[in-house]
């Protein structure tokens, strides 16, 4: 039981020795420094320093005497107090993040890789929320659309949403604004486009937002990853070209 408690205490900010001392006192409830030293196997030279530090931080209490005893404070109150302090720190961090702002002279276009599902979900929903005028999607399959169907329907009520697919019939049942691809976009969406020397494979979804943000994600394969960027002249040109092609 003590061994299970130690990593949890370390997650709360205690170091290895502190976690061992506190978990030992959890079992004993009240003990001398010598008792705690013998059971926790924390070096004798560190035991008083650690006990006094835990007392100062409000984890344990001290009963002066000969010998001095240390006792466990109500763990519920300790954890509730830590929870309040942690939430307060989170709110301070949130406000500090909002207030930080740097202005750089015309930074070069940036591209980033996202490799965790949490990061990808967070970024997709942030882009959909950020959109003000237009979202253009090029979809190879329905994995992305099903995953973010509710979000897409919501954003489609306030911006111009267009989803380019190879065959509209493959997406039956999804109430979204589809347009069938033609020309080079249709070739791109084919499973395999073979040239004289090699083949290209497109397996994912591309999203353009307001002629500024670009996002590519591949879902359902051996590795989930995404690439995103903004303020790229090339990506802005691609979006303008696709929109012009759709209008014609």
Image (cartoon, rainbow, N blue to C red):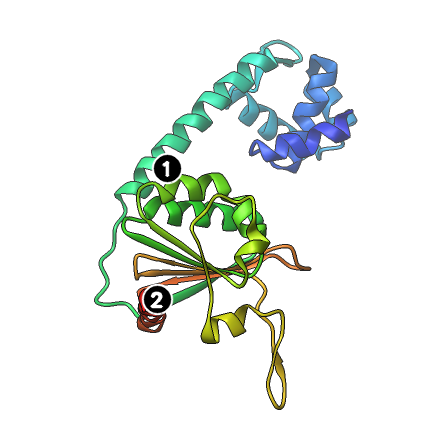
Which quadrant would the C terminus be assigned to in this image?
A: bottom left
- Would you say residue 116 is visible in this rendering? no
Please say if 27 is above or below 201: above
Q: Residue at x 30, y 72 (%)?
A: 233
> Residue 173: x percent and y percent?
56, 44
What separation in Å lies between label 1 and label 2 (alpha carbons)? 37 Å
The residue lying furthest to the bottom in this view is 196
Which quadrant would the N terminus be assigned to in this image?
A: top right
**Label 1 CA crowd tier, 10 Å (few <14, some 14–19, many 20+):** few
- Would you say residue 10 is visible in this rendering? yes
- Label 1, on which residue? 93
> Residue 189: x percent and y percent?
54, 68
Q: Residue at x 31, y 54 (%)?
A: 134
Q: Earlier in the sequence, mark 1 or mark 2?
A: 1
Identify the mark at residue 239; answer none if there is no mark: 2
Secondary structure of residue under mark 1 = helix
Secondary structure of residue under mark 2 = helix
Toward the viewer: 161 or 180? 180
> Residue 164: x percent and y percent?
45, 60
Q: Are marks 1 and 2 in contact (CB under 8 Å)?
A: no
Q: Residue at x 55, y 45 (%)?
A: 147
The quarter holding residue 238 reads: bottom left
**Label 2 CA crowd tier, 10 Å (few <14, some 14–19, many 20+):** many
> Residue 126: x percent and y percent?
40, 46
Toward the viewer: 120 or 41? 120
- Left or right? Give the position of 32 relative to 195: right
């Amino acid at each position: 039981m003590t061994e299970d408690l130690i990593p949890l205490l370390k997650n709360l900010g205690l170091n290895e020795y502190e976690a061992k001392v506190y978990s030992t006192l959890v079992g004993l409830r009240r003990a001398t420094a010598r008792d705690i030293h013998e059971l926790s196997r924390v070096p004798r030279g560190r035991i008083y320093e650690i006990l006094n530090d835990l007392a100062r931080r409000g984890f344990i209490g001290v009963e002066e005497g000969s010998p001095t005893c240390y006792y466990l404070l109500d763990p519920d109150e300790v954890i509730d107090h830590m929870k309040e302090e942690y939430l307060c720190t989170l709110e301070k961090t949130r406000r500090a993040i909002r207030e930080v702002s740097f202005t750089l002279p015309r930074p070069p276009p940036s591209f980033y890789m996202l490799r965790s599902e949490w990061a990808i979900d967070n970024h997709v929903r942030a882009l959909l929320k950020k959109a003000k005028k237009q979202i253009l999607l090029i979809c190879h399959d329905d994995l992305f659309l099903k995953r973010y169907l509710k979000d897409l329907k919501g954003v489609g009520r306030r911006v111009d949403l267009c989803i380019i697919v190879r065959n509209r019939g493959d997406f039956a049942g999804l109430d979204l604004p589809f347009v069938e691809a033609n020309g080079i976009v249709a070739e791109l969406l084919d499973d395999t486009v073979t040239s004289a020397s090699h083949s290209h494979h497109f397996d994912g979804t591309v999203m353009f937002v307001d002629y500024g943000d670009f996002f590519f994600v591949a879902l359902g394969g051996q590795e989930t990853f995404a690439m995103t960027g903004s303020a790229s002249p090339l990506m802005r040109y691609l979006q303008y070209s696709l929109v012009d092609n759709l209008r014609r």
